Image (cartoon, rainbow, N blue to C red):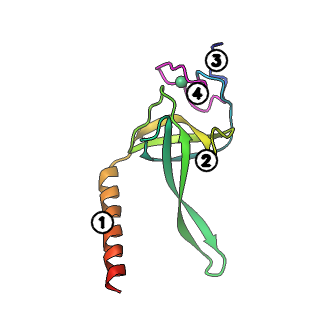
Amino acid sequence: MLKTEAKNTGIADAPKQECSDISCPFHGGLKVRGRQFTGSVMSAKMKKTAVIEFDRLAFISKYERYEKRRTRLKAHNPDCIGAKEGDVVKIMECRPLSKTKNFVIIQKLGVEKGFKDRMEAREAAKAIKEEEKEAE
Ligand SMILES: [Zn+2]
């Protein structure tokens, strides 16, 4: 395979590690374009795919206020990046890689502080909700 220079955008630096993934924006032929988001990795259990989650604000015109919405996206996780649960990553749009995957991780920005606590709190809140439902 031709070594494709990190032609892609120059938005992120190529990872130090090399990989042989053809769907890698740095070492493969995958082109990136379009939208870009930063979020936390919620799950990296799938092969070369990670679930990224981030909050956004949606304007509700009736109340002239914003409400918080949560977005979950699947993104390609190339070997050279290898993001794990709790990592904060930058993702960018690419061609559809599968039915639900149109993004690729282009940079690992760090580890989210208190990710475990956040997940535990969310689990606890879910359990309380379930209990309330049962009580009804
Ligand atoms: Zn790579």
Mark 1 belongs to which amino acid?
Ala
For the view shown, which residue lies furthest in the bottom direction?
136
Percent coordinates x, y for residue 94 in the rendering: 66, 38
Residue at mark 3: 5
Q: Is residue 62 visible?
A: yes
State the predominant SS element of the stretch in magenta.
loop
Disc 1 vs disc 2: which is toward the camera?
A: 2
Quadrant in which the N terminus is drawn: top right
Q: Are marks 1 and 3 in contact (CB under 8 Å)?
A: no
10 Å neighbourhood of mark 2: few (<14), some, or many (≥20)?
A: few
Disc 4 vs disc 3: which is toward the camera?
A: 4
Residue at mark 2: 100
Mark 2 belongs to which amino acid?
Thr
Disc 2 vs disc 3: which is toward the camera?
A: 2
- Label at residue 124: 1
When the figure is inspected, residue 78 is found, relative to residue 50, above or below; the finding is: above
Mark 3 belongs to which amino acid?
Glu
Distance from the alpha carbon under mark 2 to that under mark 4 = 17 Å
Q: Are marks 4 and 3 in contact (CB under 8 Å)?
A: no
